Amino acid sequence: MNTMETYTTPDGRTIGGPVMEMKNITLRFGGVVAIKDISFDIREGEIRAIIGPNGAGKSSMLNVMNGFYHPQEGEVFFHGKKRGPLRPYQIAEQGVARTFQNIALFKGMSTLDNIMCGRLTHSKTRFLSHLLWKGKAEAEESANREKVEKIIDFLEIQTIRKTPVGRLPYGLQKRVELGRALAAEPSLLLLDEPMAGMNVEEKEDMSRFILDVNDEFGTTIALIEHDMGVVMDIADRVVVMDYGKKIGDGTPAEVLANQDVIDAYLGVAHD
């Protein structure tokens, strides 16, 4: 696929040019190669899945994408510009947000306050102004709260807005973490196994919210997911990793028909 062309999904959505491009990424930890010479892109408006067996290097790739790891070889381009080494908070300021495989919330804080934390990149007034609660600080706080309340309504968690998240069931905690990421208003949202540990009903809810975030907010999404049924249902394109290498890249149907992918998941050789 030419890097400049757009394409239309089967449901009629227009997918634009690359938001992020990973070019020949290699990541090592000492003598261990976690990622070996992988290239792929994530396009504006799409849901891009990264799949593979355990230990394939998926989370390491996500950590390269959000700046936590810096590859020894290869380049990362964001909105067409080469990205040098940046801290994760700097990348967040550029419009990249993520959730984590293991929930990373402030368990003693309420749902509302946890999601408010996602507005930090949009807070411009100084600490002293917030202490005095005057002028710009008050206006900024009000605007941030309005944004957060809309996210709470969107995620249908109004009844738990004042509940400490440590008291919430697992599925709702995952939803709150999604809300915190959305509060940053990212142009690219990275989700690390958003369905992990969920029952069937919780997975259906989370899948619906991911599709709605993509559709209603226009947010580009890249996600790691083990549930192949979920991936086939919601992803526009899929990149497949195995032992740090890319073994497949294409639409869900193309990936399902790829014998290398079948062998990696089933552990059988093809005669």
Image (spheres, rainbow, N blue to C red):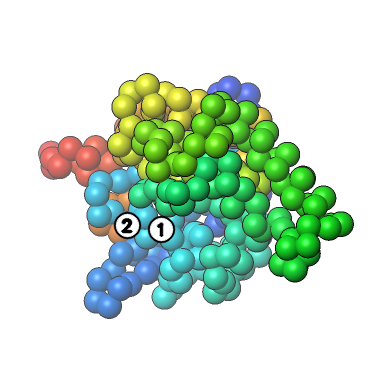
Answer whether residue 179 is visible to the viewer in this image: no
Kindly identify the residue that appears in the image at 33 percent across and 32 percent down.
198
Q: How many angstroms separate mark 2 from mark 1 (CA)?
A: 6 Å
Q: Quadrant of the C terminus?
A: top left
Circles 2 and 1: CB distance less than 8 Å? Answer: yes
Per the image, label 2 sits on a secondary structure element best described as: loop
* Residue at figure coordinates x 40%, y 43% from the top left: 166
Q: Position of residue 98 (x, y in %)?
A: 51, 51
- Residue 67, above or below 147: below
Residue under pointer 2: 57
What kind of residue is marked 1? Met
Residue 83: x %, y % from top left:
59, 68
Whether residue 243 appears in this view of the structure is: yes
- Looking at this view, is 59 or 76 the one in front? 59
Vertical placement of residue 27 versus 266, above or below: below
Q: Look at mark 1 in the image and give the residue it sits on.
A: 61
Residue 109 screen position, x and y as percent: 50, 48
